[in-house]
Image (cartoon, rainbow, N blue to C red):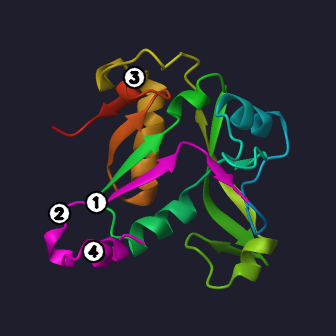
Amino acid sequence: MAGGACTGAGIGPRDIDRVIGIAKAYVTRVGAGPFPTELFDEVGDHFVDVGHEYGTNTGRRRRPGWLDAVMLRYAARVNSLSELAITKLDVLDQLETIRVCVAYEADGQRHENLPYHQSVLHRSTPVYENLPGWGVDLSGITERSQLPPEAEDYLSFIEEQVGVPVDMVGVGPGRHQVLRFAA
């Protein structure tokens, strides 16, 4: 929670001008628990292999899934995010179609916000929007203007779904592979 940063730093919340949320272009999870967008197919394997999604200490495979805008919306709201940094956009380079979970369906109801009880997540199926992939290696891109239109559309879709602007994007593992959008 972003609010805890003020307490830990010994400053008041009014001294913070920006709260940057960091999210991968897809989702991973460690351990048990509900994960509506979890993938058990070749796309999930792609996320794990290309994204190097293995635990640092244990070496265990992380659980992969599509980006979950419902969870990201919730995180943005409870942390009062002013902007987003999307990492590992390059992991999506080779995908023909990119899916984003925009809602859940459970017990005949559509949930566009995070359900109040975890048990609903266990029964949920994701509602996806499909976006076209870009089929271009992003790892050499150094400026936003070089992003393919489909990658821009993906980032714009995230902004629209979450209600927070994307200010930074990671297109590879190196520090030099972080694109900063705001002036």
Which of the two discs, 2 and 3, labels the residue nearer the N terminus? 2
Which of the two discs, 4 and 1, labels the residue nearer the N terminus? 4
Q: Is residue 64 left or right of residue 140?
A: right
Which of the two discs, 2 and 4, labels the residue nearer the N terminus? 4
Numbered circle sitting on residue 82 = 1
Nearer to us of marks 2 and 3 is 2
Q: Amino acid at mark 1?
A: Ser
- Packing grade of label 4 (10 A; few <14, some 14-19, many >=20) is some
Nearer to us of marks 2 and 4 is 4
Could you tell me how far apart the alpha carbons at marks 1 and 2 are, in whole angstroms? 9 Å
Could you tell me how far apart the alpha carbons at marks 1 and 3 are, in whole angstroms? 23 Å
Q: Amino acid at mark 4?
A: Cys
At horizontal 63% and vertical 37% (from top left) the residue drawn is 98
Could you tell me how far apart the alpha carbons at marks 4 and 3 are, in whole angstroms? 35 Å
Q: Is residue 78 left or right of residue 25?
A: left
The residue beneath circle 3 is 147
**What secondary structure is found at the residue carrying circle 1?**
loop
Query: x, y (%) of residue 110?
Result: 66, 72
1, above or below 91, in the image: below
The reply to whether the magenta stretch includes residue 119 is no
Nearer to us of marks 1 and 2 is 2
The residue beneath circle 2 is 17
